[in-house]
Image: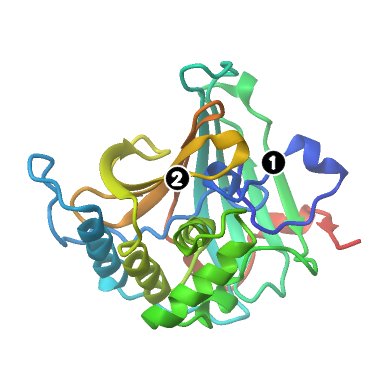
Amino acid sequence: MFRDAGRHRSDSTKRRPRARRVGLRRVMLAGGLVAAMTAGAIAVQAFRPAAPASAAEVLRLAAEAAIATPWPQPRDDQYLHYEQIAESRPEKGVPDPGTRRITGEFWESVDGSRPRLSWGKPEKSSPHRGRGEYKELVTRCPGDGGPTYADLRGWPTDQEQIRHKLAEYGKGMVLKKDVATQIWRAGTGILGHPMPPKLQAAIFKIAATLPGIETEELKDATGKTGIAVTRVDNLGGGGAISRESFIFDKTSYVFLGGQELVPGRGRELWSITRPQITDALPAWSKSLKLRKCR
């Protein structure tokens, strides 16, 4: 399943993974694999399991890593090209449907004014469990959720202002009323999208101030072991305790992706690559039929 916080659905939805707003549900394959803003190898500080950093310290180092390698700001008429991976795994006590893994490649219009191109690739290791390859060109429709890069570029990075912005954004994602849960959920909801490094850094700094965060070692959807900051919370839904995590490189603290673990539902992982800026869609996209708004 891939997360797509805002995509128009049609009858063809049955052949695509369902979109989610958290964990893999954020990672939409027709709306994006999971998008982590990987910034390359940045030597910030080595994480030593024998003397682990606090969760707040990990997030502060991740904020430094996010802005350590500047990259050109895209124009509104350009595209962000990135790759995402989403994987769901059964856990103890959960009926075992088998591990499901989806890899996607995406071309996202910076301001949302141009169609979005998605390429869902079949999983070679277990093709019988996959949903098959698909390529899709979709118009961004009114009411589609999920902010565009241009939208996120306009978000404040001042700590108090971004705290308020995240809380407001998170109100529509969770039933709980406490601000900390709303902020964390908002962060997990938009970190799967390409965003300006300064905004990503601001979100990590805010997350570092929230209660209930802890560190652990987790693997991302690519199988890479990282240091994770996890928030444990009762999100409702029958009282299930959810563990939502941000996963970072153990030495550079670059953001790799995330995980959601909920008893009775299983484990969902997502990873994303840093986007590349391009002026146009690949030539093969011209053969696709554009899916428009109804």
Secondary structure of the residue carrying numbered label 2: strand
The disc label shown at residue 210, or none = none
**Residue type, numbered disc 2:** Asp
**68 in relation to 95, above or below:** below
Q: Nearer the viewer, residue 211 or 111?
A: 211
Q: Which residue sits at x=64%, y=76%?
A: 111
The amino acid at mark 1 is Arg
Q: Report the residue at 35% width, 64% height from top.
A: 204
- Camera-side mark, 2 or 1: 2
CA distance separating discs 2 and 1: 24 Å
Of residues 114 and 5, the one nearer the viewer is 5
Query: Farthest right residue?
Result: 294
Name the quarter where the C terminus is drawn. Answer: bottom right
Whether residue 118 is situated above or below residue 103 in the rendered picture = below
Residue 248 at x, y percent in the picture = 30, 51
Q: Residue at x 63, y 27 (%)?
A: 130
Instruction: Point out which mark residue 18 bears.
Output: 1
User: Is residue 157 in sight in this rendering?
Assistant: no
Crowdedness near tag 1: few (<14), some (14–19) or many (≥20) residues, C-alpha within 10 Å: many
Q: Residue 11 occupies which quadrant of the picture?
A: top right
Q: Can you give x and y, in whole percent of width and height, for residue 48 in the image?
A: 11, 45
In this figure, which residue is indicated by the disc labeled 2? 233
Q: Quadrant of residue 6?
A: bottom right
